C-alpha cells in the first residue's frame, strides 16, 4: 500500500496521512448537516409537503456520495482531495430548481444523474475541458462570486437577519428574536475561528451554536447521539426512474448549469490543492483525467443515492496543510464519512439558525473570486457584474449565468474584440435569449 500511494516519493507516512484525512473531514463535515437542510428546504416556511427532499435520506446520500467520491479520488486518481455534495450547486438545486422553477425534486435529481453521465462521457473524450475553455476566465470568477452572494443571502434569510419588506423588498430583521440572536452568535463564533485559522472552523461553529441553542432552550435536545442509519428508500434510485422527465427546455438549462458550476468548482479546487501540495509538474496537473473522472463518477453515484452534484472540496487544503500528500488522505476521509452515518440523530439539533452562519461564511469565501476580475475593462466588468448581481436579486443562479453570457459577446463586440470571443459563447448567448423570450415564464 505504501508503494501504491508513493509514501516514500512524497515524503509521507500513515500517521501523517491519517491526521490529514481527519483534518479534511472535520473541515467539510458541516456538509453532512447543511446539505439535508438545504435540499429539504427546511428553512422555508409554509412549504407544501413533497416539495423538498427527505432530510434523513439526504443525510445518508450525502455521506455515501462523499465516501464514494473520496474513495475514487484517493484510490484511482491518488490525490489528497475529498469530495462531497457541493455548496452553491445544492442551493441552486433547492432554491432555484425546486422553489423558483417549481420542478419536482424527482426530476431535478434525474437531471443531476444525467449531468454526471454527461461528465463521464465528456471527460473520457476530452471534450469536457475544451467546452469549458470556451468560457472566459472573467465569467468563471463572476459565476463563483455570484453563487457566493446567493448563498450568503440565503443564509441571512434563514437566520432572520434579512426579512421581507413590502416597501423595499428586503429589510433588516428583528434582532430581539431568539433564533436570530442564536444565528448571529454562531456567525460571530465562526468568524473568530476562521480568523484564527482553526481547521474545521465552520463545523466547530455549528457545534457551538447547536450547544448554545440547546442550553438556552431554543433547540430541543437530541434524544440520542448515535442511532440507526436513516432509510435511504425515499431517494435511492429515484433519479433512474425519472430520467425520461428531463427532456424539456427548462431542464436542459438546469443540466447545463449543473455542468458549469461543477466544472468551475472541481477544476479550481484540483489546481489549488495540487499546487499547495507541490504535486503540479510543469504547471500541469498529472492524472488530471483520472481526477475529473472521480468527480464525474461521484456525481453519478450521488445522484443515484439521492443528492445534488458531488464535487471536489477546497477544504481539502486543510488536510494538505496538515501534511497530506497522497490519495490515502482521501481514503481516510471516506472512511470517516461512512462512520458519520451513525450520528443521524444529531440532525434534529441542526436548525436554520445553526446552518445559516455556515452559508454566510461559505459565501464570503466564494466572493473572493471578485479579485480575479479586471474591473477596469468595462467590456468585461458589465457581464461580470450582471452575472454576480442577478443571482441574489433574481433568486436564481441560472438566470445570473444566462444574463452574463448574453452581455459578454455584446460588450466584447462593441469594444472591437469580437474575435477574442469563442464561437460557443455566441451560440450560448442566442440560446439564452431564446430561453428568456419563449421558455421562461
Image: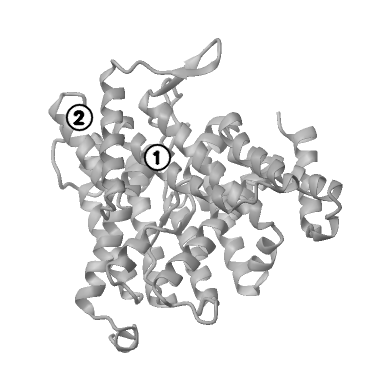
Quadrant assignment for the C terminus: top right
Q: Is residue 142 above or below residue 47?
A: below
Find numbered disc 1 in the image and state the secondary structure of the residue it sits on: helix
Location of the N terminus (image quadrant): bottom left
Q: CA distance from mark 1 to mark 2?
A: 18 Å
Q: What element does badge 2 sit on? A: helix
Residue 55 image offset from top left, x and y in percent: 35, 39
> Taking 107 as reference, is 198 left or right?
left
Residue lying at the far top of the rendered structure: 167
116 versus 153 height, above or below: below
* Viewer-nearest residue: 242 or 92: 92
Q: Name the residue rendered at 28%, 35% in the picture.
A: 188
- Residue 193 percent across, percent down from the top left: 26, 46
Kindly indicate the quadrant of the structure image that contains residue 175.
top left
* Residue shown at 38% from the left, 42% from the top: 361
Residue at the spot of label 1: 359
Task: Specify the color scheme.
Answer: one colour
Q: Which mark is residue 213?
A: 2
Q: Earlier in the sequence, mark 1 or mark 2?
A: 2
Please report the residue visible at 40 percent of the width from the left and 39 percent of the height from the top: 359
The residue lying furthest to the front in this view is 376
In the rendered structure, the answer to whether residue 222 lies left or right of residue 285 reads left
Horizontal arrangement in the rendering, residue 125 relative to residue 416 (left or right): left
Asked whether disc 1 touches disc 2, contact meaning CB atoms under 8 Å apart, the reply is no
The x, y position of residue 362, in whole percent, is 41, 45
**Residue 283 x/y as whole percent:** 55, 77
Q: Is residue 418 left or right of residue 5?
A: right
Amino acid at each position: 500500500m505504501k508503494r501504491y500511494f508513493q509514501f516514500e516519493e512524497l515524503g509521507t507516512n500513515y500517521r501523517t496521512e491519517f491526521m490529514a484525512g481527519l483534518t479534511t473531514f472535520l473541515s467539510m463535515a458541516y456538509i453532512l448537516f447543511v446539505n439535508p437542510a438545504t435540499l429539504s428546504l427546511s428553512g422555508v416556511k409554509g412549504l407544501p409537503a413533497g416539495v423538498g427532499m427527505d432530510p434523513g435520506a439526504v443525510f445518508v446520500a450525502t455521506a455515501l456520495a462523499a465516501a464514494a467520491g473520496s474513495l475514487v479520488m484517493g484510490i484511482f486518481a491518488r490525490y489528497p482531495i475529498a469530495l462531497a455534495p457541493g455548496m452553491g450547486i445544492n442551493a441552486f438545486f433547492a432554491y432555484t430548481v425546486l422553489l423558483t422553477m417549481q420542478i419536482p425534486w424527482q426530476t431535478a435529481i434525474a437531471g443531476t444523474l444525467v449531468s454526471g453521465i454527461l461528465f463521464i462521457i465528456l471527460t473520457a473524450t476530452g471534450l469536457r475541458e475544451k467546452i469549458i475553455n470556451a468560457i472566459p476566465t472573467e465569467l468563471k470568477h463572476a459565476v463563483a462570486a455570484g453563487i457566493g452572494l446567493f448563498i450568503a443571502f440565503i443564509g441571512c434569510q434563514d437566520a432572520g437577519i434579512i426579512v421581507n419588506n413590502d416597501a423595499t423588498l428586503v429589510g433588516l430583521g428583528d434582532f430581539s428574536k431568539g433564533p436570530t440572536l442564536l444565528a448571529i452568535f454562531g456567525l460571530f463564533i465562526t468568524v473568530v475561528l476562521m480568523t484564527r485559522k482553526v481547521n474545521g472552523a465552520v463545523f466547530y461553529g455549528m457545534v457551538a451554536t447547536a450547544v448554545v441553542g440547546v442550553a438556552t432552550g431554543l433547540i430541543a435536545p437530541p434524544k440520542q447521539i448515535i442511532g440507526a442509519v436513516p432509510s435511504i428508500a425515499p431517494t435511492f434510485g429515484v433519479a433512474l426512474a425519472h430520467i425520461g422527465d428531463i427532456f424539456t427546455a427548462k431542464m436542459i438549462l438546469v443540466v447545463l448549469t449543473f455542468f458549469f458550476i461543477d466544472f468551475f468548482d472541481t477544476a479550481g479546487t484540483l489546481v489549488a490543492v495540487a499546487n499547495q501540495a507541490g504535486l503540479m509538474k510543469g504547471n500541469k496537473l498529472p492524472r488530471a483525467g483520472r481526477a475529473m473522472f472521480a468527480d464525474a463518477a461521484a456525481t453519478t453515484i450521488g445522484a443515484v443515492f439521492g443528492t445534488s452534484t458531488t464535487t471536489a472540496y477546497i477544504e481539502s487544503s486543510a488536510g494538505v496543510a496538515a501534511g497530506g500528500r497522497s490519495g490515502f488522505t482521501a481514503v481516510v476521509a471516506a472512511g470517516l464519512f461512512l462512520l458519520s452515518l451513525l450520528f443521524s440523530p444529531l440532525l434534529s439539533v441542526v436548525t436554520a439558525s445553526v446552518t445559516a452562519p455556515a452559508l454566510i461564511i461559505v459565501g464570503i469565501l466564494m466572493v473572493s473570486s471578485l479579485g480575479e476580475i479586471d474591473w477596469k475593462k468595462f467590456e468585461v466588468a458589465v457581464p461580470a457584474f450582471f452575472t454576480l448581481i442577478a443571482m441574489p436579486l433574481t433568486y436564481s443562479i441560472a438566470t445570473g449565468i444566462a444574463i452574463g453570457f448574453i452581455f459578454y459577446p455584446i460588450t466584447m463586440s462593441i469594444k472591437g474584440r469580437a474575435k477574442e470571443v469563442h464561437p460557443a459563447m455566441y451560440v450560448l448567448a442566442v440560446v439564452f435569449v431564446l430561453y428568456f423570450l419563449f421558455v421562461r415564464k
